[in-house]
Image (spheres, rainbow, N blue to C red):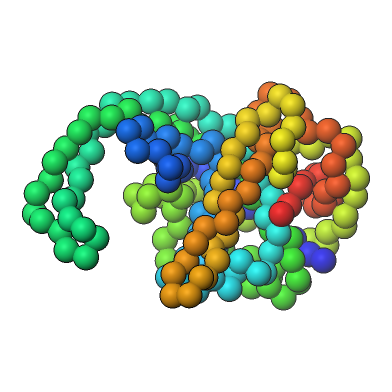
């Protein structure tokens, strides 16, 4: 089993919008797993609905720093049924959360061939890489592939599935599932260690770090 690590840093600010929020624009504190897979697909130059990378890796996320802020935003909305829209743009002010200069380490665990393919793609991406909206470009630092082994640890600072004391709890989009001609989103509840570490978990050892990957 092999793995790579890459650091991503939002150059200014970004929002990982929670789709269930309506009167408020709320943000996850970490990039959802679907967002990370989208970044990888962009690097590989895959078509929009090509979801093959969902089966390639386990993903670990380690927050390095961010500051959550809130602003008043004026949101323009289209009127329509979904099939047709009127050229009318009603607006309404609402609060919008955003993260200032967010930084994360992302870990990919999988087969050597796929890991090396993504490593080369991240070094020379086919399309621009971004997090959140397409305007939120990122700075990325990629580390060379290494062998990985499974271990047990008493303390870990990466995101882990489940609910752990002293952590931020988020229900984040994990993957897309095709149902007929449509796609549905599968969610995963995770704990995000911000001030307290996560105790006693099975994880992977990569670059001398212990990381939970799912």
Q: Is residue 197 above or below residue 180?
A: above
Horizontally, is 152 left or right of 6 in the view?
right
Q: Residue furthest left?
A: 87
Q: Residue at x 45, y 32 (%)?
A: 100
Question: For the C terminus, which image quadrant?
Answer: bottom right
Q: Residue at x 44, y 53 (%)?
A: 130
Horizontally, is 78 left or right of 115 in the view?
left
Horizontally, is 46 left or right of 172 in the view?
left
Q: Position of residue 128 (x, y in %)?
A: 42, 61
Viewer-proximal residue, 23 or 99? 23
Question: For the N terminus, which image quadrant?
Answer: bottom right
Q: Residue at x 24, y 60 (%)?
A: 82
Viewer-proximal residue, 171 or 144? 171
Q: Residue at x 10, y 56 (%)?
A: 86
Q: Position of residue 140 (x, y in %)?
A: 54, 51
Figure disc tally:
0
Q: Is residue 197 above or below residue 126?
A: above
Viewer-proximal residue, 10 or 190? 190
Q: Is residue 103 above or below residue 58?
A: above
Q: Position of residue 10 (x, y in %)?
A: 47, 42
Quadrant of the image occupied by residue 94:
top left
Q: Position of residue 175 (x, y in %)?
A: 57, 60
Viewer-proximal residue, 159 or 103? 159
* Residue 124 can be seen in this image: no
């Amino acid at each position: 089993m092999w793995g790579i690590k890459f650091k991503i840093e939002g150059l200014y600010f970004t929002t990982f919008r929670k789709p269930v929020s309506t009167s408020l624009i709320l943000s996850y504190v970490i990039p959802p797993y679907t967002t990370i897979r989208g970044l990888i697909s962009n690097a590989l130059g895959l078509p929009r609905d090509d979801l093959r990378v969902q089966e390639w890796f386990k993903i670990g996320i380690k927050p390095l720093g961010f500051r959550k802020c809130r602003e008043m935003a004026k949101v323009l909305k289209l009127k329509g049924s979904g099939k047709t829209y009127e050229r009318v743009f009603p607006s309404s002010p609402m609060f919008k959360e955003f993260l200032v200069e967010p930084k994360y380490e992302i870990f990919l665990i999988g087969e050597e061939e796929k890991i090396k393919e993504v490593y080369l793609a991240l070094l020379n991406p086919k399309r621009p890489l971004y997090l959140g909206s397409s305007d939120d470009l990122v700075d990325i630092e990629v580390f060379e592939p290494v062998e990985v082994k499974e271990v047990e640890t008493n303390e870990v600072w990466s995101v882990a599935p489940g609910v752990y004391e002293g952590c931020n709890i988020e229900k984040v989009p994990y993957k897309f599932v095709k149902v007929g001609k449509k796609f549905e989103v599968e969610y995963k509840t995770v704990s995000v260690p911000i001030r307290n570490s996560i105790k006693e978990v099975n994880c992977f050892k990569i670059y001398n770090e212990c990381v939970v990957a799912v």
